Amino acid sequence: MTGIYLLTGSYSSSHEQGIKLWEFNPVEATCIEKTGIGGIERPSFIAAHPNGVNFVATSEVEDGELVSYRLDLENHLITEINRQSANGAHPSHVCIDVSGKWLLSTNYSGGNVNVYPIQEDGSIGERTDSIKHEGSGANVERQDAPHPHSVFQQPGSNDFFVSDLGADMISVYELDRETGKLKLKKSILTTPGSGPRHLAFHPEMTVVYSLEELSSTLSVYGIGGEDFLEFVQVVELIPKQFAGTNTSAEVVVSEDGQHLYASNRGHDSIAVFAIQEKGILKFEDYATTGGAGPRHFTLLPGKQWLAVANEKSDSINMLKIGASGIPKEFIEPIPTNKPVCVKVVS
């Protein structure tokens, strides 16, 4: 069996190789670093292009940048193509439209959502749109202003969902693929103080799952109807008896639509849920992440392995998923500096 290639981003300095390419062998359960690239400060989040050749990383600093790269898997090379201003402070997330022609980004401190064209050579063009968010939330320390944390495309549509942690809001924008302009379709307020962070869509049902960082909860919404997002359910992501501090970070739905996984920083776990009729969640179990501070994770093709970026323990951890859908074991942690994003590339 051929290996699975992974890209990781980190909170490393520009003097280090903050972006790394890894090859994971699922049969031998080995993960080997193939190459890396520096020259970018805090390359926190990565979006892979549909062509499997290009990708974009955020430089999550005050004077934020978006940086495009070319990936040569055969020769294990990463080459920078160009950079553009992120148009705001601390770009936290990027998303490449399924057509491969548009890049959308969010600036956590800058409080805005931005659109850029992606050129034929993989370079990022001049910005075509920017929308400034407004609002605040109940958590005075974390929600003093709008903080758009992520942007995800709804499969099979031109709609992009933006989770605003600071304003307790999910906004849905329609992208005009001819002009690169965004049109607001709907904004809904979430539970006060919850802090929506990331989203995951069900592969078959018109259901979206919203992970809420500050309250360590996850809300289930049906997509459609008069209000566009219809609240269905909310579940806790940590045990009631847990006395420590926790912030939830990432949510992923399995490719077969049967399980949902969400990470907890503090409890340092992956919460596993079975997905039932109408997208309703049933709690199954907690799995250890094998490290501390699981800021991001991804499911590998085939639903047999889960890769976790454990920021606080400076490691990538590969969790083996059992027949029940619950990770039960993991291989020896793979050392790497402050990993905060892990993505599969083809």
Image (spheres, rainbow, N blue to C red):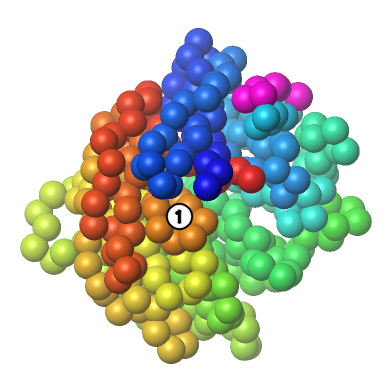
Residue under label 1: 299
Q: Is residue 168 visible?
A: no
Q: Quadrant of the C terminus?
A: top right
Q: Is residue 187 visible?
A: yes
Place of residue 93 in the rendered image (x, y in percent of width and height, measured from the top left): 56, 44
Place of residue 283 in the rendered image (x, y in percent of width and height, measured from the top left): 26, 74
Residue at the image position 55 percent from the left and 22 percent from the top: 35
Please tell me whether residue 15 is drawn above or below residue 103 in the rendered image: above
Tag 1: amino acid: Leu
Please tell me whether residue 78 is drawn above or below residue 91 in the rendered image: above
Q: Quadrant of residue 275?
A: bottom left
Per the image, label 1 sits on a secondary structure element best described as strand
Question: Which region is colored magenta?
Answer: 75-82
Q: Main secondary structure of the magenta part?
A: strand
- The verdict on residue 306 being magenta is no
Please tell me whether residue 114 is drawn above or below residue 240 in the rendered image: above
Residue at the image position 89 percent from the left and 53 percent from the top: 179
Please tell me whether residue 292 is drawn above or below residue 83 in the rendered image: below
Residue at the image position 44 percent from the left and 21 percent from the top: 12
